[in-house]
Image (cartoon, rainbow, N blue to C red):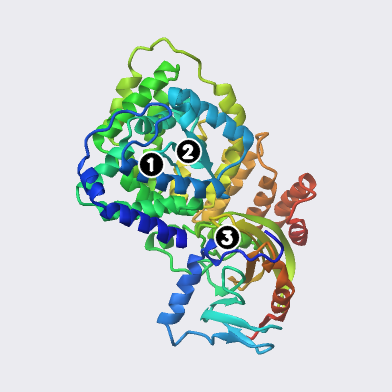
Amino acid sequence: MLRRCASVLFMCSFACSPMWLLVGCASAPVSPLQSAHQPEAEDEAALWYQMGEFEKELRQSPAVERDPALTQYVQLLVCRLADDLCGDVRVYLVRSPYFNAFMTPNGVMVLFTGLLLRSENEAQLGFVIAHELAHYRQRHGLENWRSKKSTGNLLAAIGMLAGAGNAGGVAALVSNLGAYAYLADYSRNQEREADQLGAQRMRVLGYQLKPAVSLWQAALEEEKANPRGFMSAIFASHPATEERIENLRAEAAQPSVPASMQPDDAAFGAIVIPRRKQWLDEELSRRNYAQTEVLLRRMAGFGTGRGAVAFSRGELRRMRNQGADLVAATASYREALQYPDAPVETYRQLGLVLRRQGQPDAAKAAFRSYLKRAPQANDRALIESYL
Amino acid sequence: MTRHARPSRCQAVQPWLYLSLALSLVLPGCAVAPLVKVREPVRMGSFEVSSPIEWSQFGINRMRTWTLDGPDLNHLMFYVDIKDREHVFLQLPTARQRRKGEGALYRAGISESEAVELIADGLSAYGLVTPKIEKVSPAQFGAQSGFSFELSFATERGLRYQAIGIGEIQQNTLSYALYYAPSEYYFTRNKADVEAVFRSIRSVE
């Protein structure tokens, strides 16, 4: 609390200084970022200070994914896309099912696992990263910060920084994104520029852009399934308008350029796909069934991890339990068991839905299969009580 | 942190706590006595409990919070007689949640392990990080067959918590008690007292 107060006081004293008033009037476009950039103007230094505080909190957060293989893979991908800015960008993977990614003006890149879950391949993940890097390189955040203040929204901007600077953990991150979106409330021109620069970078690196178009469309479908569900702050700050999708399509239709490298889809497959089951569990824990259903429909077409997807579809239906959901859940669990990646809990969940449908013998058979495959299960005593 | 170092009260945030406190203030007719006295039975819904130690208490009839040092440091919650489509923390669902059945809503007919899963998802929705179900077992809940469970989670700022709970599903209603405290020091300090409270639960209808 003291720290929060100190931050606000710092910002207030700064905001009230005469020098600041002069700087605040200047909202001219800023030049693109060079590597190893350090803040030049006082207002930029203040912005970096607050974002540094935010990063300190983030670094300590239990919501930050520490899986070394995953972190290393994403960092390498970010580095390839960031080019000369690689050394300035610090990547944080946040365990949260929401579809989101953002960069702060001081080089903190936050990628939510919900984005990784929704990426079918490296090109889709890469495009979102390249887009964020383009905002960072063009210093759109700083541009907006100056613009907000010069148009009389100074107090709101200070409030935003005080909030973002004290964000901790995933929920605070998600809620503060509403505030951060204020800074990242990019104009149509800024979005167009980030899309264009992101697409150019992707093409230079040999990525196809069509997957990026389909990711954007798919995310829009999910958003439509529950427009008030706050599925993705990406849409709060980067609305995926038809115009943007069309522009991306046009970029995708451009003739290819000599690529400097090849996408590493093998690494994506080895690192990202095995972790989808855990992210799907977190997605389901939101219990926002309409959006998750749209996502699962799309993921069924991925061609990988089919057992995990079918299991999750069963879970969704079991949890929702409306109409014929339990019957459909039974079918989904049985489908999941056809695939080698079906989790062992599939047997237990199958048993639970059969039990609820008044099929005790079939339920017991499923429970026995579960206990046989998971003899050390943490709910063994409970399942045995059902037998 | 040493064994006796106490985590900052500012580290944890429990929005539902403040909601229940607010409810107890705006619904004075339903508000409960602020002190739970030693071995004096406390009625909540269709149950009664007692405790070997004193607790501070607030809440309303079916939703109670007991604490010793402040809810961030020890938090014993009771949610009783939860009916079909009511939230596991008895929060009011939005119109959409009610219509679509979204959110951590109790559904008649679910199993004990599904009830624990709902509680964990409810904690997650309140911003607690990666709630993990450590164990679910059969247990007595008063004179009835019920279930016990163990959870772990962290707050947004990284403070680790352990939780134990006990519950039952009878006549299509869910009732449970959940105790959680920081893993370091506080959880262990009052675990035995809480288990005594759990053992004291009895139905009064």
In this view of the protein, which residue sits in the foreground, A174 or B117?
A174
* Residue assigned mark 1: A234
Q: Nearer the viewer, mark 3 or mark 1?
A: 1
Q: Report which residue position mark 2 lands on.
A: A115
- Asked if disc 1 and disc 2 are in contact, CB closer than 8 Å, the reply is yes
| Residue A368 visible here | yes
Rounded to the nearest angstrom, the CA distance separating label 3 from label 1 is 28 Å
Q: Nearer the viewer, residue A113 or A13?
A: A13
Snapshot quadrant of residue A207: top left
Q: CA distance from mark 1 to mark 2?
A: 10 Å
**Position of residue A319 measured from the top left corner of the image (x, y, whole percent):** 55, 55
> Mark 2 falls within which chain?
A
Numbered label tally: 3
Badge 3 and badge 1 in a common chain: no
Q: Residues within 10 Å of mark 2 (few under 14, many from 20)?
A: many
- Chain where mark 3 sits: B
Label 1: how many Cα within 10 Å (few below 14, some 14–19, many 20+): many
Say which residue appears at 59% left-offset and 31% top-offset. Answer: A72
- Residue sitting at 63 percent across and 69 percent down? B178
Secondary structure, mark 3, is helix
Callout 2 amino acid = Leu
In this rendering, does residue A304 appear at all?
no
